[in-house]
Amino acid sequence: MDPAELSRAFGIEPEYSFRAGSVRPSRSGMTTASVRSESYWLGELPTAEQPLGPSFLGAPRIGERQLEAVRNNLTWTLSLICIRVLKNHAELLRRIRSGGGEITLLVTLFGSEVGSFSLLPEASRVFGDLGVALEFELAGQ
């Protein structure tokens, strides 16, 4: 799969990406370059410094109070990402999975920002149905 297709679909420029078949340069410069066997795309969803906005969530009519609640509640945030973003891209995600691809959503939690959270059954069901693995990284203060 062409990583540029993912960038267009998600509207996010990747932090890092490459396509299967592209040349992989030698790190040491002492061996010949190899060819990548798989495609890879890593993009970053908005963070606290780049708050979730109505356009990202796919909900142009979300109220400011609801948006602030989402920004301050990881459970709601994950649920809205699941419902709005993943469902908007369900066919693409299914195509990735059917082609043997893997999809992971990495959520980095900073100890000072999150005391606890839960994942609603509806959200976990959608993530599971779409074959999206969830990884949680607990970062220090």
Image (cartoon, rainbow, N blue to C red):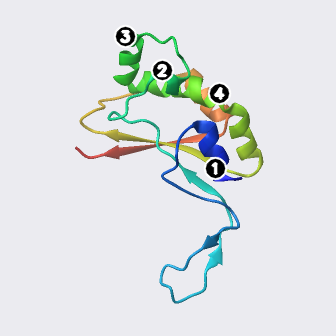
Q: Nearer the viewer, residue 118 or 95?
A: 95
* SS at circle 4: helix
User: Residue beneath label 1, please?
Assistant: 4
Q: Which residue lies at the image location 35% right of the left edge and 39% below the top edge?
A: 109
Q: Which residue lies at the image location 41% right of the left edge and 17% below the top edge?
A: 67
Give the tally of numbered discs: 4
Q: Nearer the viewer, residue 117 or 4?
A: 4
Q: To which quarter of the image does residue 63 belong? A: top left
Three-letter code, disc 3 = Arg
* Residue 8 image offset from top left, x and y in percent: 62, 41
**Counting other residues with Cα less than 10 Å from the Cα at mark 3, is it few (<14), some (14-19), or many (20 or more)?**
few
**Counting other residues with Cα less than 10 Å from the Cα at mark 2, is it few (<14), some (14-19), or many (20 or more)?**
some
- In this rendering, position of residue 82 left or right of residue 54: right
State which quarter of the image contains the C terminus: top left
Dot in front, 1 or 3: 1
Dot in front, 2 or 4: 2
Res 119 seen here: no
Q: Earlier in the sequence, mark 1 or mark 4?
A: 1
User: Residue beneath label 4, please?
Assistant: 88
Q: Earlier in the sequence, mark 2 or mark 1?
A: 1
Q: Are marks 1 and 4 in contact (CB under 8 Å)?
A: no
User: Residue beneath label 2, please?
Assistant: 54
